[in-house]
Amino acid sequence: MNPAQLQALTADFQALQDRIVDGIEAVEAQHGGATFVEDAWERPGGGGGRTRVLTAGKVWERGGVNFSQVEGEASPALKAQMNTEADRFWAAGVSLVLHPNNPHVPIVHMNVRHFALSDGTSWFGGGIDMTPHYVHPEEATQFHHVLKAACDAHPCADYARFKDWADDYFFVPHRGETRGVGGIFFDHLGREGATEAQWQAHKDFVFEVGNAFLPAYLPIVHENVAKAFTSQEREWQLHRRGRYVEFNLVWDRGTRFGLVSNGRTESILMSLPPEVKWTYDYDAGPKEQETLGWLKKGIDWAGTPSQS
């Protein structure tokens, strides 16, 4: 890719960050809540980013919407993770995680990105998934329908394959459970070589996913944000956040990439919630056990979900 294409792609990711931040702040404003604070940073060796963090909001206890564009020499650890011998890399994208105050509002994550290497290889990737503290199948179905529509609008996308990929990726092996109700995950779109038209098609799909975030998630927020909750439900929320932290720090490739590429640690770890609990041999109640029963691969959320 030439520098002009990379510059244009950078601007597109920044504009996506702006749209998402505006949408989240509009919800906070409805409840008299907080706004994002921006932290612009530069990366030693090349690139930088805009980390936007929302703290102690009325709807979200913490949220981060991060844009980054980093480049430079590929370290041995980075080469190993990206399976390349290229000497230099370029990467840009938008990532977000939102941790709500109300246990009835789900945690949500999204990441869309592009990589380019000095050997001429480049590709798109991304993912979006939802982690309810309490699983309600109708909400998971609603979420998946929006993602399926985004995939169905682009011939280069395959909802069924990307949904299965998400089931495998957003899985906590040491717990034997999925992180939540999943979503879609895809990577290396175009890595094996793509024409200019194919590259544009992949880009269009990636930004379709980015633009699907607000309509996929915000209706569920509006439905649940004013619901009353008990101290037991809050306790369960803190423990479910613990599982979220376990995945991000142990298994998430994005976290690992940020650390091995000498990214900004504060921005990389913005996905972690402000409060979390681990209790030895935690005794979940019947309602909580029901949610655990939904945390498995292969559920047809876009069709007729069933625990069997």
Image: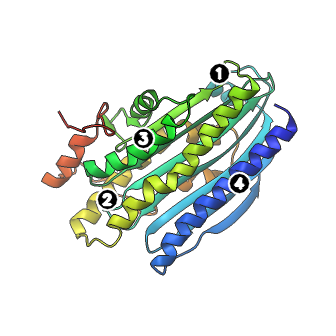
Mark 3 vs mark 2, foreground winner is 3
List x then y, in percent, for residue 71. Answer: 78, 39
Q: Earlier in the sequence, mark 2 or mark 1?
A: 1
Q: Residue at x 26, y 73 (%)?
A: 228
Q: Residue at x 63, y 62 (%)?
A: 52
The kind of residue tagged 2 is Gln
List x then y, in percent, for residue 25. Answer: 55, 70
Q: Is residue 175 visible?
A: no
Classify mark 3: helix, strand or loop.
strand
Q: Is residue 280 left or right of residue 34?
A: left
Q: Give above or below for 145 relative to 155.
A: below
**Inter-mark Cα distance, 3 to 2:** 20 Å
Q: Give above or below for 193 relative to 67.
A: above
Mark 1 vs mark 4, foreground winner is 4
Q: Which residue is mark 1?
A: 83
Q: Residue at x 43, y 46 (%)?
A: 146
Q: In the image, which disc is placed on residue 183?
A: 3
Q: Earlier in the sequence, mark 4 or mark 2?
A: 4
Q: Do the numbered discs 3 and 4 sit on residues whose CB atoms are within 8 Å?
A: no
Q: In the depicted view, which residue is nearer to us: 276 or 94?
A: 94
List x then y, in percent, for residue 163. Answer: 42, 33
In the rendered image, the quadrant that contains the N terminus is top right
**Inter-mark Cα distance, 3 to 1:** 26 Å
